[in-house]
């Protein structure tokens, strides 16, 4: 059969594509121009791929063709054409790529719709790939010739309905031409002025020339290869936006060019947020790896786990064509590149902390978990990452402190770095464990993230100072300068023993012992532990993961100077059967569990609190 007589073959779109096309065709989204960004980005991808292919394969169709993108239009006929000399598509690739959903943005878009977001609110946020052309097109004809010498040319056509057609086509040169018959209300896009504006806005940094009426209209600059002095702040911001499609400015950038001992050109960004918008697409950011300006890969394997949020471009003649975690391990050059990138990024983050504490706090809020993860799992990274670590503390009034600053504030004879774990800022601020530390003017770090304890176990110490949990049963502290507990206020030992016995009787197995505290000042009691911190930290994590974990038995310490304990002692002596004693003890214990973040079900306390309140209202004396 000759080509002319081959009848077009009609194929159905997949259900998801039909759904997507239907939405796009009827969309009222006002920034329809992003369709051009998507088509150009696909053309650019196709050019990068042929460039990469030709590094190792000379047997490609039309090997001499200029690597470029071309825009043509006809205002009268209301047509627009986007052509490229990229890899092209075979017949099967046309069916696969333009009949199903390849684009991750399109997937996220559909997911967003399932969750009830309005389509027009999110079309522009990530772009939906090739299919976005149907926002402006009545009909689309894709003619493509693959680089594979025997593939021939094929024509794909669709009006955005339920199916598309395929026919063999005539096309001598390699690559893809996308001819768009514009809708009546999209005639504006068949205009040189308009097209140039759109390219400048969204595609200026595409690294292949984009021709319009025989002029190159994009700047194409490989910004990362320029000297940092020659790049303006706003160019960095614009490049970031085009690279990541992030609507927010990045938090910082790091740009450097080094030639020895290894050649690296890198432009890296830290985004402002870990997630963006309604859909959290930034699970994997964008890190483009180039060798001599040729895009060889887009992957984060070059950076360690704890820097996966970094976006940008790394260009080095010393990068192999295929990077993986293994190449990073085995190649000296790649390891060297990684070291340099990590070193520069961390240096820049430390500078940010100096220059702009507010921005650093924003960084810490978003990406602190990555740093902690690195500290916990990668012993070799500790030296780099420790300066980035931050905690709230009993002295910083909601602000954060570094370990270096904590240590600088330590008194000469302070034995350890003290820390207190708890569920949140309010709980730790009211913690009875702080009594002794306030009294002795000792600073305590607050560990509010359940995984913090794990990290502390991995660190063990900082600059020779060990970490010490404040609820350790064996905790020794120096004598307080001034003890508010005057001896005459203390309960007679016999009376105190009766209180201890009553607590033991009421709480039974729930506490391993009840004893007097040497450290409490303003609080009536606290829970301390004899279980090694490492084991308790593991239990914290298990609890976090929803596993049933038995709280290891804790020691209850009572403060013999506290009015609550003293009044209780009096009650026990005068009216041992008083109905408020046992609920009072129960509630005191529950309060402690709450502050420790160990209470399994706080709502259970309500009936008892009610009972205590009723009694309090009744009391006459
Ligand atoms: P994505 O670019 O995210 O993969 P798109 O919907 O934009 O998703 O494109 C789908 C696929 O179609 C691409 O992955 C690519 O394989 C193919 N494709 C689209 N345009 C071209 C083109 N100009 N040249 C070669 N392949 C293309
Ligand atoms: Mg695309």
Image: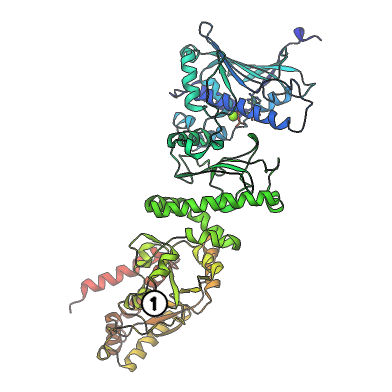
Q: Is residue 82 left or right of residue 611?
A: right
Q: Position of residue 430 (x, y in %)?
A: 34, 69
| Closest to the observer, 587 or 157 | 157
Q: Is residue 278 left or right of residue 571?
A: right
Confirm if mark 1 falls within 8 A of ligand 1. no
**In the image, farthest residue toward the left:** 620
Q: Residue at x 72, y 21 (%)?
A: 64
Which residue is label 1 attached to?
526
Q: Residue at x 52, y 59 (%)?
A: 385
Q: Is residue 392 left or right of residue 162?
A: left
Q: Residue at x 60, y 26 (%)?
A: 208
Image coloring type: rainbow
**On screen, residue 261 above or below 137:** below
In which quadrant of the rendered view does residue 179 lie?
Answer: top right
**In the image, farthest residue toward the top:** 76
Where disc 1 sits, the SS reads strand
**On screen, residue 29 above or below 525:** above
Disc tally is: 1
Q: Position of residue 620 (x, y in %)?
A: 18, 77
**On screen, residue 29 above or below 293:** above
**In the image, farthest residue toward the front:** 260
In which quadrant of the rendered view does residue 478 lie?
Answer: bottom left
Q: Position of residue 496 (x, y in %)?
A: 34, 89
Q: Quadrant of ligand 1?
A: top right
Residue 592 in sight here: yes
Residue 538 in sight here: no
Q: Quadrant of the C terminus?
A: bottom left
* Badge 1: residue crowd in 10 Å (few <14, some 14–19, many ≥20): many
Q: Position of residue 255 (x, y in %)?
A: 52, 43
Q: Residue at x 57, y 14 (%)?
A: 214
Q: Quadrant of the N terminus?
A: top right
| Closest to the observer, 614 or 382 | 382
């Amino acid at each position: 059969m000759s080509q002319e007589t081959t009848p077009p073959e009609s194929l159905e779109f997949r259900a998801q594509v039909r759904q997507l096309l239907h939405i796009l065709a009827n969309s009222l989204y006002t920034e329809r121009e992003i369709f051009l960004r998507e088509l150009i980005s696909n053309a650019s991808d196709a050019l990068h791929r042929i460039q990469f292919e030709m590094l190792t394969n000379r047997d490609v169709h039309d090997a001499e063709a200029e690597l470029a993108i071309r825009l043509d239009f006809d205002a009268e006929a209301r047509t627009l054409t986007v052509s490229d000399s990229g890899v092209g598509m075979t017949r099967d690739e046309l069916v696969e790529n333009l009949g199903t959903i390849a684009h991750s943005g399109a997937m996220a878009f559909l997911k967003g719709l399932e969750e009830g977001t309005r389509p027009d609110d999110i079309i522009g946020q990530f772009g939906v790939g090739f299919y976005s052309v149907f926002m402006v097109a009545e009909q689309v004809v894709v003619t493509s010739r693959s680089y594979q010498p025997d593939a021939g040319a094929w024509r794909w056509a669709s009006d955005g309905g339920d199916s598309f057609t395929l026919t063999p086509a005539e096309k001598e040169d390699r690559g893809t031409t996308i001819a768009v018959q514009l809708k009546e209300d999209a005639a504006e896009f068949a205009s040189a002025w308009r097209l140039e504006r759109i390219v400048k806005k969204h595609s200026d940094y595409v690294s292949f020339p984009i021709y319009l009426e025989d002029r190159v209209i994009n700047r194409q600059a490989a910004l990362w290869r320029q000297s940092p002095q020659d790049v303006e702040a706003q160019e960095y911001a614009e490049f970031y936006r085009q690279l990541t499609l992030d609507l927010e400015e990045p938090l910082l950038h790091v740009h450097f060019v080094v030639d020895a001992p290894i050649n690296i050109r890198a432009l890296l960004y830290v985004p402002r947020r870990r997630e963006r918008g309604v859909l959290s697409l930034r699970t994997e950011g964008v890190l483009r790896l180039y060798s001599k300006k040729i895009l060889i890969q887009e992957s984060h394997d070059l950076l360690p786990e704890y820097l996966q949020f970094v976006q940008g471009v790394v260009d080095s003649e010393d990068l192999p064509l295929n990077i993986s975690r293994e190449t990073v391990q085995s190649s000296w050059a790649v390891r060297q590149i990684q070291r340099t990138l990590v070193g520069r990024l961390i240096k820049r983050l430390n500078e940010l902390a100096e220059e702009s504490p507010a921005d650093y706090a924003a960084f810490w809020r978003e990406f602190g978990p990555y740093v902690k993860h690195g500290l916990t799992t990668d012993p070799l990274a500790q030296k780099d990452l420790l300066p980035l670590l931050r905690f709230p503390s009993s002295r910083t009034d909601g602000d954060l402190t570094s370990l270096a600053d904590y240590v600088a504030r330590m008194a000469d004879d302070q034995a350890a770095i003290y820390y207190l774990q708890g569920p949140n800022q309010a709980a730790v601020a009211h913690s009875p464990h702080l009594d002794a530390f306030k009294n002795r003017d000792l600073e305590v770090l607050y560990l509010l993230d359940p995984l913090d304890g794990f990290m502390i176990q991995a660190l063990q110490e900082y600059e020779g100072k060990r970490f010490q949990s404040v609820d350790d049963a064996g905790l020794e502290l120096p004598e307080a300068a001034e003890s508010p507990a005057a001896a005459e206020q203390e309960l007679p030992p016999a009376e105190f023993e009766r209180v201890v016995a009553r607590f033991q009787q009421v709480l039974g197995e729930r506490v391993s012992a009840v004893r007097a505290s040497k450290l409490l000042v303003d609080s009536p009691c606290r829970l301390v532990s004899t279980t090694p911190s490492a084991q308790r930290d593991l239990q914290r994590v298990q609890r976090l993961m929803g596993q049933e974990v038995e709280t290891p038995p804790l020691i209850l310490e009572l403060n013999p100077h506290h009015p609550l304990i003293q009044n209780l002692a009096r009650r026990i002596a005068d009216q041992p059967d008083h109905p408020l004693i046992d609920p009072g003890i129960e509630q005191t214990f529950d309060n402690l569990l709450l502050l420790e973040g160990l209470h399994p079900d706080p709502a259970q306390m309500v009936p008892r609190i009610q009972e205590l309140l009723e009694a309090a209202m009744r009391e006459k004396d």
